[in-house]
Image (tube, rainbow, N blue to C red):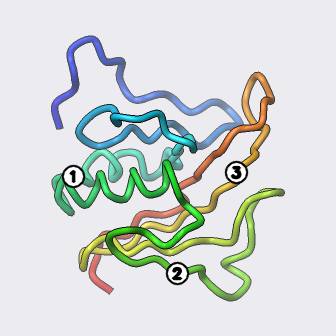
């Protein structure tokens, strides 16, 4: 995927911050997102490959969904809240794990918090953390 001129390389994770910004595939959104979308650094390379693996439109639809309405059913595609102990929130204030089907190509699991206070400023803001990306057929 080619980068925009002047665009900095992928952000580096901090010593205790394994999640980094998951940029919107294909460029900036037309409206400011309600949630900041983060991906675990282990999946950053796969995240960057997402448009070539599932198509730009599908990748954008996922990002737009989690950046705006992660707790609602997606307008396109399917999602479900996972059950069992693996679905439990990993951090205080976060949702259970949501399992999003990315076409027939695989799934992306995430959790979200509409009022996370993580970060340098500690101000409440929406955060989505992508936990896993699995693009193998199940």
Q: Tell me the residue that label 3 is attached to.
A: 114
The structure residue drawn at horizontal position 37% and vertical position 75%, both measured from the top left corner, is 101
Q: Which of marks 1 and 3 is in front?
A: 3
Residue 105, located in which quarter of the rendered image? bottom left
Identify whether 67 is placed above or below 5: below
Number of the label disc, if any, that sits on residue 12: none
- Toward which corner of the image does residue 81 lie, by quadrant? bottom right
Circles 2 and 1: CB atoms closer than 8 Å:
no
Q: Which residue lies furthest to the top in this view?
A: 6
Q: Name the residue under label 1.
A: 51
Where 64 sits versus 17, above or below? below
Residue 25 higher or lower than 7, as above or below:
below
Name the spot of residue 33 as percent of width and height, x first. 49, 39
Quickly name the residue at label 2: 80
| Among the two numbered marks 2 and 1 on one chain, the one whose residue lies closer to the N terminus | 1
**Secondary element type, mark 2:** strand
Q: Where is residue 61 in the image (x, y as percent from the top left)?
A: 32, 57
Q: Whole-Å distance between the Cαs marked 2 and 3?
A: 18 Å
What is the CA distance from the residue labelled 1 to the residue labelled 3? 27 Å
User: Is the N terminus in the top left, top right, bottom left or bottom right quadrant?
Assistant: top left
The Cα atoms of the two marked residues, 2 and 1, are separated by: 22 Å
Q: Quick one: 37 or 114, which is closer to the camera? A: 114
Q: Residue at x 35, y 23 (%)?
A: 9
Residue at 65% across, 87% down: 83
């Amino acid at each position: 995927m080619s980068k925009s001129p002047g665009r900095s390389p992928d952000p580096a994770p901090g010593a205790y911050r394994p999640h980094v910004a998951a940029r919107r595939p294909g460029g900036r959104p037309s409206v400011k997102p309600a949630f900041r979308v983060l991906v675990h650094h282990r999946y950053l390379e796969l995240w960057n490959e997402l448009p070539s693996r599932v198509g730009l439109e599908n990748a954008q639809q996922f990002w737009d969904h989690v950046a705006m309405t992660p707790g609602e059913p997606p307008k396109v595609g399917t999602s479900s809240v996972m059950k069992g102990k693996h679905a439990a929130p990993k951090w205080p204030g976060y949702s259970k794990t949501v399992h999003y089907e990315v076409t027939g190509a695989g799934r992306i699991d995430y959790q979200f918090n509409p009022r996370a206070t993580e970060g340098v400023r500690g101000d409440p803001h929406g955060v989505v953390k992508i936990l896993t990306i699995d693009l193998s057929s199940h």
